[in-house]
Image (cartoon, grey):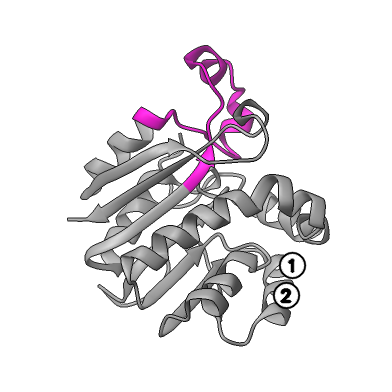
């Protein structure tokens, strides 16, 4: 893993997602890949009672807009480094405050948030730098809910080419739980995302934690 503030190929990733922003919103892509984890995140935010929420790596803003429309907290932020993604997000909702920035530097005051959520984006972040930033901007007891892909097997991770690791790194669930704990959180839930299709087809994991 890179120890820099952002991954070496972060700009490449950002430009790539800007190009793919239209594909991201296709109904079939959303229904099969993204809506199930979004539903899981909404459940966590709703039950937490969070009033200030940020979706980090928000993409085209579907989840952030749903949080604003379906839960209605006092503040909803959508943060993403991709101009292309945020252009579509801004057109989706005026309720959400959209910011073009990375997970490692949210530029919000200490304790400004009650919840941070992220779906299928964390593997692009510098993990430890992002978790430190999340801990800083969350109020004590604040909610952290993250969904990321879980490609099974230590061998598969060991064989991941270095060039790909510079773009994205997918930790094992246990490894990720250790990172979250080391950053000052208490993990309360970690399990596969509930889906209408076999989990092996989209092997992602929900991790929920609270800021200590």
Residues tagged 1 and 2 counted as in contact (Cβ below 8 A): yes
Q: Which residue matches tag 2? A: 87
Q: Residue at x 30, y 50 (%)?
A: 209
Quadrant (top left, top right, bottom left, bottom right) of the N terminus: top left
Quadrant (top left, top right, bottom left, bottom right) of the C terminus: bottom left
Q: Is residue 105 left or right of residue 162?
A: left
Q: Is residue 56 left or right of residue 52?
A: right
Query: Total label count?
Result: 2
In this view, the residue in front, 195 or 60, is 195
Query: Picture coordinates of residue 204 (x, y %)?
Result: 55, 37
* Disc 2, SS: helix
Q: Which residue matches tag 1? A: 84
Query: Picture coordinates of residue 49 (x, y %)?
Result: 32, 71
Furthest toward the top, the residue is 155
Query: Picture coordinates of residue 27 (x, y %)?
Result: 80, 57
Q: Is residue 111 above or below residue 145?
A: below
Is residue 152 in view from this perspective?
Answer: yes
């Amino acid at each position: 893993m890179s120890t820099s503030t952002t991954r070496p190929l972060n700009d490449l990733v950002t430009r790539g997602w800007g190009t793919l922003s239209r594909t991201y919103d296709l109904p079939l892509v959303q229904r099969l890949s993204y809506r199930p984890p979004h539903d899981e995140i909404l459940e966590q935010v709703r039950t937490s009672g969070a009033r200030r929420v940020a979706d980090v790596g928000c993409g085209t803003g579907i989840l952030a807009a749903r949080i604003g429309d379906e839960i209605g907290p006092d503040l909803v932020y959508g943060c993403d480094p991709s101009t292309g993604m945020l252009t579509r997000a801004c057109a989706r909702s005026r309720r959400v405050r959209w910011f073009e920035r990375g997970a490692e530097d949210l530029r919000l005051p200490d304790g400004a948030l009650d919840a941070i959520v992220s779906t299928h984006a964390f593997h692009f972040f510098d993990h430890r730098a992002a978790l430190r930033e999340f801990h800083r901007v969350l109020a004590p007891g604040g909610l952290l809910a993250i969904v990321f892909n879980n490609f099974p097997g230590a061998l598969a991770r060991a064989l991941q080419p270095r060039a790909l690791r510079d773009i994205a790194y997918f930790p094992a669930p246990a490894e990720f739980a250790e990172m979250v704990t080391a950053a000052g959180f208490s993990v309360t839930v970690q399990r596969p995302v509930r889906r209408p299709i076999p989990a092996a087809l989209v092997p992602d994991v929900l991790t929920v934690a609270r800021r200590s």
